[in-house]
Amino acid sequence: MAETFRALRSRNYRLFFTGQTLSLIGSWMQTVAMSWLIYRITGSKVMLGTVALSSQIPMFVAAPFAGVVTDRLNRHKILLVTQSLAMLQALTLAILVLTGTVHPWHIIVLSAFIGVVNAFDMPTRQAFVPELVGDRSILSNVIALNSAQFNLARLIGPVVAGVAIKAVGEGYCFLLNAVSYVAVLTALKMIRVEREERFISNQNPLAELVAGARYAWSLHPIRALLGLIAVVSFASGSLQEVFLPVYAKEVFHGNSGTLGVMFACIAVGALAAAYMLAARKSVIGLGKWIIWASGLTAISMALFGYCTNLYLGLVILVGLGFGAMKHMGSTNTMLQTIVEDNMRGRVMAFYAMAMVGSMPIGSFLSGFIAAAIGSPATLLLFSAISLLATLLFYHSLPRFRAELRPIYERKGISA
C-alpha cells in the first residue's frame, strides 16, 4: 500500500497534489454545470457540441506552440499565470449566471478563453511534475497518482454539482470553482523547485516546433501512441460532452443529479484503473494494456448507446471509465518514459493535442450526425472507428516493441 503512494513522500509533490485535487473538483463542477446550463437554455445537441468545440479546439491549434514555450520558460511561473486566468474565467461566468445576464454566446466565448488557457496549462503541468519529485524512477507512480487525482475529482465534483444545480443553480457551481483555484495557487506559491536549465537552442520558436514534430514522428512508439489516443479521444469524447446530458434527460428521464451520478460512475472505473497503474513497478507490458483498454472503451460506448435502463447504463459507464483511464494513463506513462528531457514539453503538448484537441472535433460532428441518424447509431459508428484504430495498433505491436527495446535499455529500464 505504501509503495502505491510513494510519490507523496515528496513535499513539493504533496503540496501540488493537494492543491490540484481541490481545484479539479471545482473544475469538474463547472464542466457538469456548463453542459447542463447550455442544454437547459437551448435544448440543442448541436449547441452542446459547439460549446465543446469552442473549449477544446484551442488545444488542437495552440498546444504545439505551448510546448515550445514550456521547454523555453520557467514552468512554475507559467502555471501561476494559467491558473490565475482560469480563476478569472470561472468568476466571470459565475457573475453572468448569478445576475441573470448570461447568453449562449457568453458561454461559447468563455469556453474558448479557457481552451486557450488549458492549451498552455496542460503540457506545462505534464512537463512540470517530473521536476517536483526529482527521482525519475517513481515517474510512473507520479503519473498514475495524477490520474487518480483527476478521477477522484471527477467522482466528487459531478455529484456535488448535481446537488448544487438542483438546490441553488449553475451559478454557484461556477463560483465554487473560482474559489477552488485559491488552493492550487497557494500550493504553487509554497512549492520550492531548484531552477533547472531549459534546453534552449538558437533556433526560432517555429523551428523548435518543427524539430519537436520531427522527433515525435521519427519514433514509431511515440507516433503509434499519439495516433491511437487521438482517434479514441475523437470518438469517445462526444459521449461525455454531448450524449450524457441527452441520455440523462431524454432516455433516463432524470435531472442534473442523474447527470452527476453518470459522471461519477465513469470516475469510479477510472479510479480503479489509476490505482492499478499506481501499484505497478515497471512500464514493461503497458502496450498490451493499451490494446485491451482502448477496446473496452469502444465496446462500452457502443453498449451505452443502446441502453435504456439507467442502472445498466451506470455499470457500463464504470467499464468505460476503467478502459479510458487505463488507456490514457498507460499512454502518458510510456511517453514520459520514452521522451528525452529536452523534448518533454513539446511531446507532451502533442499528447495534449491528440487526447484533448481531437475531442471537440468528434463532439461537434457527433451533434450533426446524431440529428441525422440518432444517438445510438452515432455512438455505434464512433465505437467502430475506435476499434479499427485499436486493431491497427495491435498489428504494429511487433515493430513497436522492437523500437522500444533499445530505448529502454539505454535508459536502464527493465522488468
Image (cartoon, helix red, strand yellow):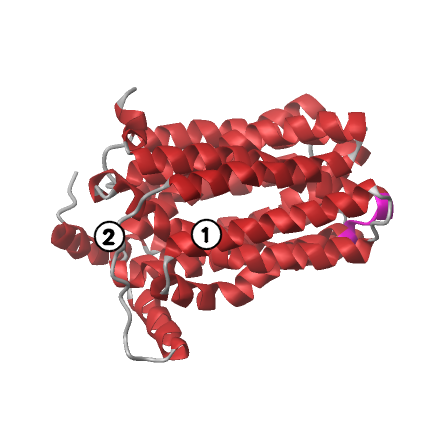
Residue name at image x 53 percent, y 49 percent: 83
Determine the main secondary structure of the stretch shown in magenta: helix
Q: Which residue is mark 2?
A: 401
Tell which of 188 and 235 is nearer to you.
Answer: 188
Under tag 1, what secondary structure?
helix
Question: Magenta includes 43?
Answer: yes
In this rendering, which labeled residue sits more in front, label 1 or label 2? 1
Q: Quadrant of the N terminus?
A: top left
Q: Is residue 47 left or right of residue 366?
A: right
Residue bounds of the magenta highlight: 41-47
Spot occupied by residue 252 in the image (x, y as percentages of width and height):
77, 29
Q: Is residue 346 left or right of residue 179?
A: left
Spot occupied by residue 110 in the image (x, y as percentages of width and height):
70, 55
Q: Is residue 350 above or below residue 206?
A: above
Q: Earlier in the sequence, mark 1 or mark 2?
A: 1
Q: Is residue 395 left or right of residue 112?
A: left
Residue name at image x 31 percent, y 42 percent: 286
Q: Is residue 281 above or below residue 362?
A: above
Tell which of 369 and 3 is nearer to you.
Answer: 3
Q: Tell me which amino acid carries mark 1.
A: Leu
Under tag 2, what secondary structure?
helix
Q: Quadrant of the C terminus?
A: top left
Residue 53 visible, this angle? no
Residue name at image x 54 percent, y 43 percent: 298
Spot occupied by residue 45 in the image (x, y as percentages of width and height):
78, 49
Tell which of 250 and 155 is nearer to you.
Answer: 155
Q: Which mark is residue 79?
A: 1
Q: Label 1 crowding class (10 Å Cα cut-off): few <14, some 14-19, many 20+? A: many
